[in-house]
């Protein structure tokens, strides 16, 4: 385990990854009118591909990272409801930045549904700037990026 308590997920974590993701995103389903994309992800395939990181025992936070051309896409960040407000999300966001730098990538990108207002208040506080609003299939998304220093 890393010093920040975040580690690559293993096959043994797939059920926990699914459970935390479901618990974190399910409350948004009614508001946005569709099932949030992370709930429909192939968690086993993402874990096998090395894209998923977890923290906690039991797992309280899940991070899905995908390398892009010159950037790291933070595809999903999920915190178990009983761990909200404990710093888990903040540590996961910080880990994504460290991971991007170690991978030689100059920025972290992410997106959130336009109706997930809580995230729109959160990400700018962590240095993310809004790039665009774009419809991706059934999802109305706000795309953000954070350019990394050194």
Image: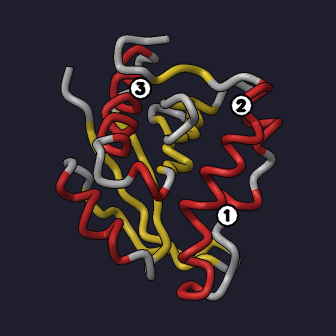
Tell me the element at label 2.
Answer: helix
Q: Nearer the viewer, residue 82 or 1?
A: 82
Q: Nearer the viewer, mark 3 or mark 1?
A: 1
Cα gap from disc 2 to disc 1, whole angstroms:
20 Å
Q: Is residue 109 above or below residue 27?
A: above
Q: Residues within 10 Å of mark 3 (few under 14, many from 20)?
A: many
Q: Position of residue 120 (x, y in %)?
A: 31, 69
Residue 5 placement: quadrant? top left
Mark 3, mark 2: which one is toward the viewer? 2
| Quadrant in the picture for the C terminus | top left
Relative to 88, is 149 on the left or the right? left
Number of numbered tags placed on the structure image: 3
* Secondary-structure class at tag 3: helix
Compute the Cα span from label 3 to label 2. 23 Å
Q: Residue at x 47, y 58 (%)?
A: 81
The residue labelled by disc 1 is 37
Query: Closest to the observer: 89 or 105?
Result: 89
Secondary structure beneath label 1 = helix
Q: CA distance from mark 3 to mark 1?
A: 23 Å
- Is the residue marked by circle 1 packed among few (<14), some (14-19), or many (20+) residues within 10 Å? few
**Left or right side of 70 for 125:** left
What residue is pinned by disc 3?
100
* 3 or 1: tag closer to the N-terminus: 1
Give the residue drawn at x 49%, y 30%.
Answer: 55
Identify whether 139 is placed above or below 61.
below
The residue that mark 2 highlights is 13
């Amino acid at each position: 385990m890393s010093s920040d308590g975040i580690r690559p997920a293993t096959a043994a974590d797939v059920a926990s990854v699914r459970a935390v993701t479901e618990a974190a995103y399910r409350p948004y389903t009614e508001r946005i009118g569709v099932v949030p994309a992370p709930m429909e992800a192939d968690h086993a395939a993402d874990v096998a591909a090395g894209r998923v990181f977890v923290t906690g025992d039991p797992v309280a936070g899940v991070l899905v990272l995908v390398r892009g051309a010159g950037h790291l896409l933070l595809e999903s960040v999920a915190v178990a409801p009983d761990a909200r407000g404990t710093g888990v999300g903040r540590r996961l966001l910080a880990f994504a930045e460290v991971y991007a730098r170690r991978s030689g990538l100059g920025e972290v990108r992410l997106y959130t549904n336009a109706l997930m207002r809580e995230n729109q208040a959160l990400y700018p506080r962590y240095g993310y700037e809004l790039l665009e609003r774009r419809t991706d299939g059934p999802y109305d998304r706000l795309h953000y990026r954070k350019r990394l220093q050194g």
